[in-house]
Image (cartoon, grey):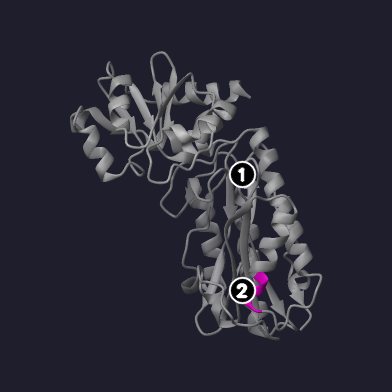
């Protein structure tokens, strides 16, 4: 296990052109050390010497036991409340003439502290390199992501076993939360997002007291966090009672776009082509104006991480990418449909989600 984290550090140091990397995002610290700490307002920093590959973890002393049990860092730099952590940080980085930071994570106040010892041109963002590494998953990562998917799908299968009419969005969300924890999840990765009727046309709406009724779309988008901190993300949209002609038309359009995006998800494909093919499919059905977001995103330890499958991304899909394919049509005043699957990109791309999505399977009794 230690070798995995050492390899990640080695791959990072090979990509960056600085003397020292300072990693402060708790999930990135976990990615490179196996130690997860939520420091809240306190300072957490993994320092990586790019020449020697030595790692030092600076952390609140109250987390010493967690660090002892899980961290693979070579050097421990605990500090107590009331102490200025930057004093210890600067001492450890004394010989570093340039440092790499996560540009999107370091706060303004901490950046100003760095400027006490470094000039602006000595501080560069290495966030793209870190994001790129996290975007590459191996077989062990895939196995742990599959566990997250299986927990999610078990909970959703439990949900559809019972009649749903009359249940509120909040009640359904609470049920799913209880079930995923019963199956071993430590939390949900977000939501659950449960929207029924006209509210299903809100891509990121909030579950409320609206009850499911015959004739409704019921959109459920949720995922879990496993004990190993891997996440899942899946959406299924159900139809309560016999679909109307328009419901059937919208649903089949989104399902067709979902299939087109999955088929296009192959090693070497420019990422924007996944968005292009799904968007073109929906546009040809007359719903192009109602597809308002990108086709998908990467995920792993985080719910949204590299790569981004948007219309402007010309990067190529690579073996080891884990992505979502999630086209949607959202018609205000009527309702919306999103169908989302998780994929592992390999020589033969594998769809990790298996929950049924044909219209006959997602039509529930009123």
Q: Is residue 169 magenta?
A: yes
Crowding near the residue tagged with mark 1, few <14, some 14–19, many ≥20 C-alpha atoms within 10 Å? many
Give the quadrant of the C terminus.
Answer: bottom right
Crowding near the residue tagged with mark 2, few <14, some 14–19, many ≥20 C-alpha atoms within 10 Å? some
Q: Earlier in the sequence, mark 1 or mark 2?
A: 2
- Residue 170, numbered label: 2
Q: Residue at x 36, y 33 (%)?
A: 126
- Across and down, in percent, residue 161 comes to 81, 70
Q: Main secondary structure of the magenta part?
A: helix
- Across and down, in percent, residue 344 comes to 64, 43
Rounded to the nearest angstrom, the CA distance separating label 1 from label 2 is 25 Å
**Element marked by disc 2:** helix
Bounds of the magenta segment: 168-172
Q: Nearer the viewer, residue 61 or 129?
A: 61
Front of the two marks 1 and 2: 2
Q: Residue at x 69, y 73 (%)?
A: 238
- Across and down, in percent, residue 335 comes to 57, 79
- Across and down, in percent, residue 38 comes to 48, 43
* Image vertical order of residue 74 relative to residue 62, above or below: above
Residue 90 visible in this rendered orientation of the protein = yes
Residues at marks 1 and 2 touching, judged by CB atoms closer than 8 Å:
no
Q: Is residue 251 magenta?
A: no
Residue placed under numbered mark 1 in the picture:
230
Q: In the image, 96: left or right of 147?
A: left
């Amino acid at each position: 296990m230690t070798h995995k984290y050492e390899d990640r550090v080695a791959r990072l140091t090979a990509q960056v052109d600085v003397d020292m990397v300072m990693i402060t995002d708790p999930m990135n610290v976990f990615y490179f050390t196996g130690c997860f700490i939520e420091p809240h307002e306190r300072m957490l920093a993994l320092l990586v010497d790019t020449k020697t590959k030595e790692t030092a973890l600076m952390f609140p002393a109250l987390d010493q036991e967690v660090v002892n049990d899980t961290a693979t860092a070579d050097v421990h730099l605990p500090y107590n409340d009331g102490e200025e952590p930057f004093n210890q940080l600067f001492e450890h980085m004394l010989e570093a003439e340039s440092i790499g930071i996560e540009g999107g994570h370091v706060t303004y106040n901490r950046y100003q502290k760095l400027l006490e010892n470094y000039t602006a041109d000595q501080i560069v963002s290495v966030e793209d390199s870190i994001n790129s590494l996290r975007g590459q998953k191996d077989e062990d990562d895939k196995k742990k992501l599959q566990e997250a998917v299986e927990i999610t799908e078990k909970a959703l299968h439990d949900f559809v076993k019972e009649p749903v009419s009359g249940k509120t969005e909040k009640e359904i969300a609470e049920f799913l939360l209880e079930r995923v924890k019963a199956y071993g999840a430590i939390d949900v990765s977000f939501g659950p997002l449960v929207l029924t009727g006209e509210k299903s046309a809100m891509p990121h709406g909030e579950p409320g007291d609206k009850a499911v009724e015959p004739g409704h779309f019921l959109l459920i988008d949720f995922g879990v966090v496993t004990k190993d901190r891997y996440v899942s993300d899946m959406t299924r949209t159900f139809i309560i009672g016999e679909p109307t002609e328009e419901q059937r038309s919208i649903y089949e359009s989104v399902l067709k776009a979902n299939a087109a995006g999955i088929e296009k998800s192959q090693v070497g494909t420019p990422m924007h082509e996944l968005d292009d093919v799904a968007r073109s499919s929906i546009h040809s059905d007359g719903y192009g104006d109602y597809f308002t977001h990108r086709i998908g995103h990467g995920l792993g330890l985080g719910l949204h991480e590299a790569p981004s499958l948007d219309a402007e991304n010309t990067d190529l899909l690579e073996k080891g990418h884990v992505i979502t394919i999630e086209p949607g049509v959202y018609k205000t005043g009527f309702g919306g449909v999103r169908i989302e699957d998780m994929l592992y990109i390999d020589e033969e791309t594998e769809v990790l989600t298996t929950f049924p999505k044909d219209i006959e399977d997602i039509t529930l009794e009123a």
